[in-house]
Image (cartoon, rainbow, N blue to C red):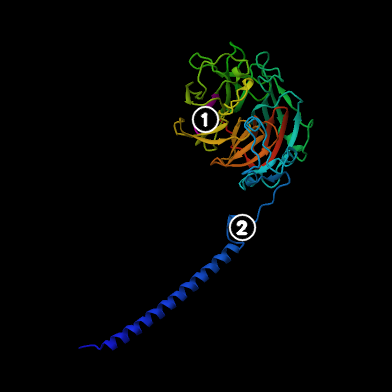
Amino acid sequence: MTVSPSIVQSAKWRRSLTIRDTNCKMTSISLSLVVLTAGVLIRAYSSPSVSNYQRLPRREVPEQAQVIDWKSFNVLPTVLPPAESNASTFFIPPGHDLASLTEKPFHIYDDEFYDVIGDNPTLTLIANTGTNPMFHEAAVWYPPTDEMFFVQNAGAPAAGTGLNKSNVILKIALSEATAVSNLRNATGSVNVQTVDAPAILNSNGATNYRGQLVFAAEGQGDDLTSQLVVMNPREPYNTTILLNNYFGRQFNSLNDVAVNPRNKELYFTDTLYGFLQDFRPVPGLRNQVYRYNDKTGAVAAVADGFNLPNGITFSPDGSYAYVTDTGIFYGVWGWNLTNPASIYRFDVKEDGTWENRKLFAYADSGVPDGVHCDSNGNVYSGCGDGVHVWNPSGKLIGKIYLGKVSANFNFAGDGRMVILAEEDLYYATLGASGGGYIEA
């Protein structure tokens, strides 16, 4: 059958109208959906019940804390030359001065730091020794007596220690510090006791070890070598030498020691500071990290490539090792500002060996010296202006700001910390807990 062209044209016209009508309806529906979706999104993002980081109510800043805004110093009107602004100087963010920074010493660089400091962190100065750096290193908590041990600076001219006399070991009772934690300055309220352990020469690092304490002693002169020494934390403080050589060769200047939570072995750093402070001979070994198994007596190097390896610690589960490199500072020889002021992280294998060295953090003030982890894996280090805190990915989240050097510190269980700052001794309360007391 033949179809008339007019009928065909009429049919096409009707179909076109139908299609256009359908398209208009679909467009109308699409626009309605877009408007509806936009409305839902607007209501969702304005709803207080939605978890959106930028719209969450800001947490209340504790009394002794303050927020430091990174963006306030991303661009400065003047950036001083390296001779005037470097690792040995203090950086004061715009709108602050040293007094305002120390008045509220818990500096929040990231919201994660709120969980570290808790709702009401406190910092108390509990002792001051004038010019004698009595509060330097080897901070270690002994839970059975609830005491914190630490040592005087070895090799410091103001202390007269090093070649002519050894530094001393000291301790405090945490109960006395806790009793005055409501004060900002409580000097004279806490009794700082000297521990009589003359066999430990120029000690620097320490940790808990099989119910006792083990110290990394730097040694003294050519003949009194650097060694690991175990001390009973109770009177009369008996001592036993655990290790004093590597195949008949003197260690350079043992610096710090830690227990691996997995295999319970001791890992320790050997560096040059005894030599650089003129109380140890020219070094005869590489600067490196060793491990010691006291069941077999085996000693092995596990990591090298450092300038001046210093502090050492492990993550709470033992899967990571952290080592600080303070090569930027050469003691009495001064600063080399292009050398490391860094923390390196290693993966710890099941057999106790290390691999996958990674730059974890670079300190912005001084050097990262002593290093410890809390129970959540955050990493703390004593630096040029206080204690710095990084999250497990290496992001700086906050500082406990002292306005002076802190070489070391340590947790005393849950929510307590003792901070060593040479002539000053501080007690802090906060929300975080230590990485755990290891009964190796």
Q: Residue 301: where, in percent of width, then height?
A: 48, 24
Residue 267 lies in the magenta stretch? yes
Under mark 1, the amino acid is Lys
Which residue shows up at 73% across the image and 27% down it?
A: 423
Query: Where residue 404 sits: x, y (%)?
Result: 70, 32
* Count of all numbered marks drawn on residues in the image: 2
Left or right of residue 50, residue 118 in this image: right
Q: Which residue is mark 1?
A: 264
Query: Residue 410, located in which quarter of the rendered image?
Result: top right
Residue 32 or residue 44, whichever sits in front: 32
The answer to which quarter of the image holds residue 271 is top right
Q: Which residue is the extreme one toward the top?
A: 223
> Relative to 271, is 120 above or below?
below
Q: Is 182 in front, or is 185? A: 185
Residue 15 occupies quadrant: bottom left
Query: Where does label 2 land, which residue?
Result: 55
Q: Position of residue 114 (x, y in %)?
A: 64, 47
Q: Nearer the viewer, residue 320 or 416?
A: 320
Tag 2: residue type?
Arg
Helix, strand or loop for disc 2: helix
Q: Is residue 348 left or right of residue 125?
A: left
Location of the C terminus by quadrant is: top right
For residue 146, say whether it is visible.
Answer: no
* CA–CA distance in space, label 2 to label 1: 46 Å
Secondary structure type for disc 1: loop
Whether residue 205 is visible here, answered yes or no, is yes
Q: Is residue 262 above or below residue 225?
A: below
**Residue 62, how many percent across, how many down?**
71, 47
Q: Few, some or many C-alpha atoms within 10 Å of disc 1 (few <14, some 14-19, many ≥20)?
A: some
Magenta span of residues: 259-269
Q: Residue furthest left?
A: 1
